[in-house]
Image (cartoon, grey):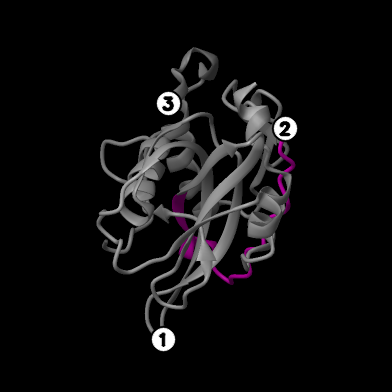
Amino acid sequence: MSISQPVDLGKPMRRNHMSMQRESWLQHLGCDFQNMVKNIAICRYYSYLSYIHFEVGGRIVGKNPVAHVKMKQLPLSVEITDKRDMRTQFAALCYRVKDGETEVLMITSRGTGRWILPKGWPMEGKTPGDCALVEAWEEAGVKGKVTGGCLALYTYVKGVSADEQLPCAVMVYPVRVKSLSKKYPESEERERRWMSPKAASKRVDEPELAHLLRKFDAKRLLA
């Protein structure tokens, strides 16, 4: 896929947030997060039980019932000199409940073989959750369903070349796995493995993602 460029909507945020449909809000939030990181120095995100609060400079600008579980958001580790360099991606936290225990599906990156979540860039005409689901299929062969709103965000630096790196903020969406295909677009380029959330948290490099995995319990999502 081509490298995503920063999105500039060029439109003010809508005032009547509570009347917006769930996926429309997520799409609006995902795009506006890009612009907020580009244009302001203080950007704080909180994910609470049944609500997402988006706060800029101490003022709440959005609230909508999209989250099903309470997940504490760690402060983002954005070590860049120019916040306009930040990119937004969407990731799928693919999960199942087997013998009463939560398992998450991890995949390896193509370059370094690190254990990661399926993730990718915004796509024209798709919501953030839809984007995460597409990446889950292309990178892990997952056939499933998005079962909630954004669980949390994490940051990492994507290496594009030896001389170019892109700092990325990744919004994570829960995807319940119905089945796994043996043949999928990147089946020859990646490994995939079911792990306990605790084991997965020890295999990722990003501290915010590790925290999310340690606290993740699919049974609470499905309750």
Q: Residue at x 58, y 60 (%)?
A: 155
The relative height of residue 137 versus residue 126 in the rendered view (above or below) is below
The overriding secondary structure of the stretch rendered in magenta is loop
Observer-nearest of 10 and 215: 215
Give the mark nearest the N terminus, 3 or 1: 3
The relative height of residue 141 versus residue 217 in the rendered view (above or below) is below
Q: What residue type is labelled 1?
A: Asp
Q: Name the residue under label 3.
A: 23
The relative height of residue 63 versus residue 136 in the rendered view (above or below) is above
CA neighbours of label 2 inside 10 A, class few (<14), some (14 to 19), many (20+): some
Give the mark nearest the N terminus, 3 or 2: 3
Q: Residue at x 56, y 48 (%)?
A: 104
Q: Which residue lies furthest to the front in this view?
A: 99
Dot 3: element: helix
The relative height of residue 105 versus residue 129 in the rendered view (above or below) is below
Residue 67: quadrant of the picture: top right
Q: Nearer the viewer, mark 3 or mark 2?
A: 2
Q: Name the residue under label 2.
A: 70
Dot 1: element: loop
Q: Does the magenta stretch include residue 89?
A: yes
Q: What residue type is labelled 3?
A: Glu
Residue 13 placement (x, y as % from top left): 47, 30
Q: Which of marks 2 and 1 is in front?
A: 2
Numbered range of the magenta stretch: 70-90
CA neighbours of label 1 inside 10 A, class few (<14), some (14 to 19), many (20+): few
Q: Residue at x 59, y 70 (%)?
A: 80
Q: Is residue 54 left or right of residue 17?
A: right
Q: Nearer the viewer, mark 3 or mark 1?
A: 3
Residue 140 placement (x, y as % from top left): 38, 53
Q: Mark 1 points at which residue?
A: 163
Residue 165 placement (x, y as % from top left): 45, 76
